[in-house]
Amino acid sequence: MSGTSFSVLPQYLLPKRAMTAFAGQVANAPAGRLTAFIIRRFIERYGVDMDEAVNPDIHSYLTFNDFFTRALRSEKRPIAPADYVCPADGVISQLGVVSGDRIFQAKGHNYSATALIGGDIELAEKFQGGSFATIYLSPRDYHRVHMPCRGLPVRMVHVPGTLFSVNPLTVRGVPGLFARNERVICVFESELGPFVMVLVGATIVGSISTVWHGIVNPRRSGEIRDWRYDKETPVLEQGDEMGRFQLGSTVIMLFPKNGLIFNPLWTPGRTVRFGEMMATRIDSGNTV
């Protein structure tokens, strides 16, 4: 067994679901001074810049999750004049071409796009030969997720799964991690074509929510749930919030073949911010 495999062995042994449930209870509990103490220690530990927050007063947050999902000042995340903008703060884990049905995870590992989106072969075929980008949101990052372009939510699927950590070490060591973890698949139609945003859960991620539904996984039933919308949901503009994590995780985006060209500055390991230029559509007159 390799060193990486040994290092992720605890991920298989830990009671991840119980840990996540406990973390969720603590993060949602209004505990007064204790809440402020936890927030202060978290800021110190991860170097969170509260000058970016709409509300920088840590004592005003009723719960830790209120702090964790805090809003940022709009001038701190301007929206670039681009066809597609980055939907979240984080680090690029991987990006590139969907090769057949396979998405690159890390050296020696890839996974099925069909499995990632809940087993829907017809939907997955729309993205064969297309593009993907995976963004990891660390604990210090802003944890709201925004629209890369204008789009209409047409479907949402909640796929139960395990709750491995999604930190870089675990991603390198656990095969098919993103297609195994709990996740929420959001399907959009847009003027630029269909696209998918997958919000991937992880250890101690208390919940995942979308702006049109609210919390998607308040109770983990173990069953796949599928919502289809017939123009019941509002169109979301580029830069609008579409969802959020209560504690950190990963966003994976899928786009059709010949749909876009990524910003050439985007490479694995690069730190990115919500609102920066992500990609240009191929038939656009814009230049990267």
Image (cartoon, rainbow, N blue to C red):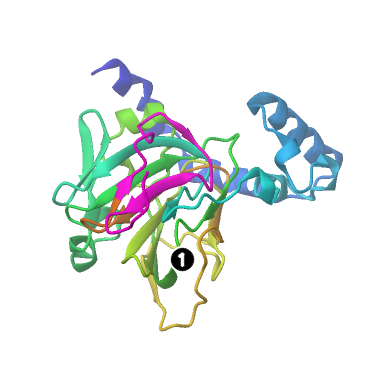
Image location of residue 188, percent across then percent down: 38, 67
Q: Is residue 97 magenta?
A: no
Asked if 13 appears above or below 118 in the picture, the reply is above
Question: Which corner quadrant of the image does residue 213 belong to?
Answer: bottom right
Which residue is pictured at 47% across the width and 47% down the height?
86
Quadrant housing the C terminus: top left
In the rendering, at what x and y percent does residue 274 appear?
53, 46
Q: Is residue 200 above or below residue 39?
A: below
Stretch in magenta: 261-288
Q: Which residue is mark 1?
A: 150
Name of the residue lying farthest toward the top = 3
Would residue 35 appear left or right of 218 to someone viewing this image? right
Q: Secondary structure at mark 1?
A: loop
Where in the figure is residue 268, as x and y percent of width and height? 35, 31
Classify residue 36 as left or right of residue 278: right
- Magenta segment's dominant SS is loop
The residue nearer to you, when weighing 206 against 255, is 255
Q: Nearer the viewer, residue 222 or 48?
A: 48
**On the rendered image, what quadrant is the N terminus found in?**
top left
Q: Residues within 10 Å of mark 1 (few under 14, many from 20)?
A: some
Q: Is residue 65 visible?
A: no
Residue pictured at 32% horizontal, 29% vertical: 172
Residue in the image at 29% along x and 47% along y: 261
Q: Residue at x 70, y 33 (%)?
A: 49
186 lies above or below 5 = below
Answer whether residue 107 is visible to the viewer in this image: yes
Q: Amino acid under label 1?
A: Arg
Please tell me which residue lies in front, 211 or 226.
Answer: 211
Q: Look at the image and say whether residue 280 sits in the magenta stretch.
A: yes
Of 168 and 237, which appears nearest the observer? Answer: 237
